[in-house]
Image (cartoon, grey):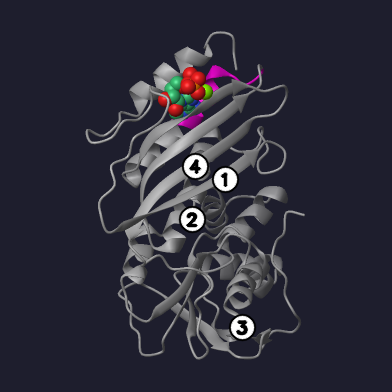
Amino acid sequence: MSKKLSEFDLIDKIKTMFPTPQNMIGIGDDCAIIPQASGFDTLVSTDLLIEGVHFLRQDIQPTLLGWKAAAVNLSDIAAMGGKPIGTFLSVALPSDCSQEWIDQFLEGYHDISSCYNVSLLGGDTTRSLNTICINVGVVGTVPHGKALQRNTAQVGDLICVTGPLGDAAAGLKIILSQLPRLDHESALVLRHYHPMPRIEEGITLAATPGVHAMMDISDGIASDLRHIVKASQVGADVDVERLPFSNELLSVCQKYNWDRVQLALEGGEDYELLFTMDPQCHPAVQYHTIGQITDSNTIQWIGGNRTYEGFSHF
Ligand code: ADP
Ligand code: MG
């Protein structure tokens, strides 16, 4: 952290920038206090972002990192069908991290907090030796027993996604290959840096009878669907021909001769929702059906020319 701004100055600044709602206790005491409505379950999740592992300081604009740090957590609440209430932001900052960097990071964090009407209720602030480390925690709420889990897919369910796949992976490829950013390329880069957690869609899906299992797409469905299949002890047939693609992705794949199926299945960070439901079910969200749950205990990629694996950190 720069010398100009002490730990307590920074906390004061954050406290002013993120006022606590009337009915809660947020930044300033030893714990946040969040009132609980009866008949609801609490959802909690955290995510860690390490410079050099999850982002490159010289590469990502701090406003976008602030957005994304909160976005990936809000997406975990969306994945259960919950409504986010508050987040917790812990930062470890090295001395060469400029005040401007911190301000911009907080600005991005503030943007998404306003956009999704979620309060920053606490965190921790400390010095780090070399790298920026960010941990975001999130608390959400869902009607009792209604959270959608991964282990409840049923044989015969349709497999669906809430939006196009592969955009974020293509965006990352454009960034890493330093390709010129024309209209379509810029849109894909934005899908990588500025994901939109599907909160409204998740809430609607959790309230729709017949929707059985759900998760968010963070590692690519080749990997994510495997989690549902394994947890539910079922199998899946995915119809590769039915994967939804954006026009931007199709045009960029054609231009650079990229494999759109591979980007869709193995590229991560789309942060769309992946869910399974009874074929009679018609939830009031936009979705694309891409396959069906089977009793085969394996995933078949029908129309694909090989087997696919998702992204893994290890
Ligand atoms: P403690 O020593 O009890 O951990 P701190 O001095 O670390 O307290 O923090 C004081 C208050 O400021 C706490 O309410 C804490 O949640 C909040 N806080 C500290 N750092 C952050 C941060 N980066 N973002 C939001 N709130 C923070
Ligand atoms: Mg502390």
Instruction: From the image, tell me which residue sits under label 2.
Output: 76
Instruction: Name the foreground residue: 59 vs 217.
Output: 217
Q: Check mark 1 vs ligand 1: CB closer than 8 Å? yes or no.
A: no
Query: Could you tell me the amino acid type at mark 1?
Result: Asp
Residue 71 appears at what percent x and percent y? 47, 48
Q: Position of residue 45 (x, y in %)?
A: 50, 49
Does the residue at mark 1 contact the one at mark 2 (Cβ under 8 Å)?
Answer: yes
* Most frequent secondary structure within the magenta stretch: helix
What is the C-alpha distance between the residues marked 2 and 3?
26 Å
Label 4 vs 2, first from the N-terminus: 2
**Amino acid type, callout 2:** Asp
Q: Are marks 4 and 2 in contact (CB under 8 Å)?
A: no
Mark before the other along the chain sequence, 1 or 3: 1
Q: Amino acid at mark 3?
A: Val
The tag on residue 240 is 3
Secondary structure beneath disc 3?
A: helix
Q: Which mark is residue 137?
A: 4
Tags 4 and 3 in contact by the CB under 8 Å rule?
A: no
* Mark whose residue sits in front, 2 or 3: 2
Residue drawn at (60%, 38%) of the image: 60
Residue drawn at x 65%, y 90% as measured from the top left: 296
Numbered disc 1: secondary structure: strand
| Above or below, comparing residue 263 to residue 241 in the picture | above
- State which region is magenta: 96-106
Q: Which residue is mark 1?
A: 47
Within 8 Å: ligand 1 and the Cβ of disc 4?
no
